[in-house]
Image (spheres, grey):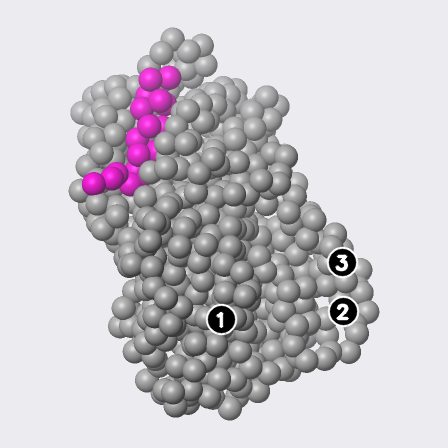
Amino acid sequence: MTQIFDNPADFADEALDGFVAANRGYVARVDGGVVRSTEVPAGQVALVVGGGSGHYPAFAGLVGPGLAAGSACGNMFASPAAGQVYRVAKAANAGGGVLLSYGNYAGDVLHFGQAQLRLNAEGIETRTVLVTDDIASAPLDQIEKRRGIAGDLTVFKIAGAAAEAGLDLDGVERLAIRTNYRTRSLGVAFDGCTLPGADAPLFHVPAGQMSLGLGIHGEPGISEHPMPTASELAELLVSRLLADKPYDAGNRVVAIVNGLGTVKYDELFLLFGKIEKLLTAAGLTVVEPECGELVTSLDMSGLSLTLLWLDDELEQLWAAPADTPAFRKGNLAPRARRELSGPDDAVASEAEDTTPAAADLGRLAAAVLAQVQGVVVEHEEELGNLDAIAGDGDHGIGMRRGVDAATAAAQEVSTAGASVERVLTAAGEAWSERAGGTSGALWGSAVIAAGLALGNKDSYSGGDAADAVTAFVDAITALGKAEPGDKTMVDALLPFRDSFLTAFDGGASVSAALASAAAAAQSAADATASLRPLKGRARPLAEKSLGHPDPGAVSFGLIAARISDYLDSDSPLAASAAGKGVQA
């Protein structure tokens, strides 16, 4: 149980502030995460890692000479937002380009990918290497779909050592890709972890059982087994990993036994001893192993085994010195501290000559977002519990963080008389920044797209509402790349759009079309209970998801219904908008 906090919503930020205060010789705080506080040679490739908080020493604990140049740090178990990744990478860049590396999770892929596009557009050459070491999350012939767990360490260490050795971006990327391919991991859990402020773990493992194939975001395993002895557990982990070894595997391996939070060192050492004997019996030489807490999951009771099959080049880089708050190897000469100016402040928006109609619609948009906030707050716990069935349980809290930030931003700019375009752009950016995760990226981009579609016009009609609905949906489908039947928000989103456009094109008012669309969305969300997830963190746990609707689809259906009810009411703002040409 996570017990030390003031406000659970501030846990990740305050923990990161405290980490920096305890490690100023290694790291400096920047907006979005941390970077090295020591001098970095000009022209050196900057390895920027990151992910959700709650996994210490990953990811901030691995920042320092010989390893990462910076870490973007998201909320608890949620990916950092694109803006956070961008700002950390900008601060870490030393002129040699940036390599982004992180676990293969949908939210991280979306946010880091958006940051990469922005960095490349500004002339900072940026590449990405995803970590895909977890053999439980996809078969070997779909290795690109696997998620990243404790194998993060091997990829980060090799890439960081290559950068420290002076290799260019091509060379660092090549070695990171090779390391990832030659890394395999498998984890087990004996019980779940508890998010700050929660009164129960995200999942429980039945007494006398062990869950095989867990994730590091609180996801339960893919199967349950009777609790083994230490020797049986060692045999299980080693045999599964050796059966999945790379086609060009040699006989020298790095072995990493990683504790996930509650299993402590004496137990880990006991297990490592048995694993080492099995590997030796299999004809393998164990090279510079690691045994301890390296990638955790808050207070999860569990552990994982990682194997990296070495070649001569990788072995040399694995053995190279590194000096970070949580991972030290060999000796490095002391380095002078540097003065960090941090990334440039956001450029102020250009002056806008807002039309009265756009300002009225901007105030309506802020009021609608306040309604969205209300329904998310009301259902936050329900959405989290639904997500925990086959995910990590953060959907409710992620939506809450996003909509709280979006509503506050929208209220601030709408009060100043901004256009609906600016109101929704500010709201979308705030949503993405604060929520992180897949939902943060999707909702933030969609809200911005709707604002751009509405623009700053002299008058508005129902056709503008249809354009905004279309833009909202297109942003999510283009960014998330989910298809109907994948068991995602898209399964409720597309029926919403189709129903709205069909009703509106048939002569219905905006409010009538919205009511029809909201009903279609809620019905479609309920129907996702019969689907098997084909995308996202729930995909490896498809059997657990059957019989339960997708939380993203459910939250969208609830929001659509609340907006429909509000715009069909006697709201003065809705009436005002109707008077300006929008058929409310």
Instruction: Please say if 296 is above or below 509.
Output: below
107 and 343: which is toward the camera: 107
Say which residue appears at 63% left-offset and 82% top-offset: 320
Cβ–Cβ under 8 Å for marks 1 and 3? no
- Give the secondary structure at mark 2: loop
Give the label on residue 39, or none: 2
Q: Which residue is drawn at 51% across and 55% down?
A: 262
**Label 1 or label 2, whichever comes before in sequence order:** 2
Q: Nearer the viewer, residue 365 or 36?
A: 36
**For residue 143, what is the image quadrant?**
bottom left
What residue is shown with label 1? 270
Say what amino acid the circle numbered 3 marks: Arg
Question: Where does residue 481 sit, x and y in percent of width and height?
Answer: 32, 52
Whether residue 377 can be seen here: yes
Kindly report the distance in space between the C-alpha atoms of the residues bearing marks 3 and 2: 13 Å
Which secondary structure lies at badge 1? Answer: helix
Question: CA separation, marks 1 and 2?
Answer: 40 Å
Question: Nearest the camera: 358 or 321?
Answer: 321
Q: Distance between the residues labelled 1 and 3?
A: 35 Å
Is the Cβ of the residue at disc 1 closer than 8 Å to that at disc 2?
no
Instruction: Please report whichever mark, 3 or 2, sits nearer to the chain's N-terminal start.
Output: 3
Above or below, 32 relative to 564: below
Amino acid type, mark 1: Leu
Give yes or no for residue 285 being in the magenta stretch: no
Badge 2, how many Cα within 10 Å: few under 14, some, many 20+? some
Magenta residues? 547-566
Q: Mark 3 points at which residue?
A: 24
Name the dominant secondary structure of the magenta segment.
helix
Pair 3/2: label in front: 3
Choose between 89 and 312: the one closer to the eye: 312
Q: Can residue 421 be seen in this view?
A: no
Q: Position of residue 295 (x, y in %)?
A: 52, 61
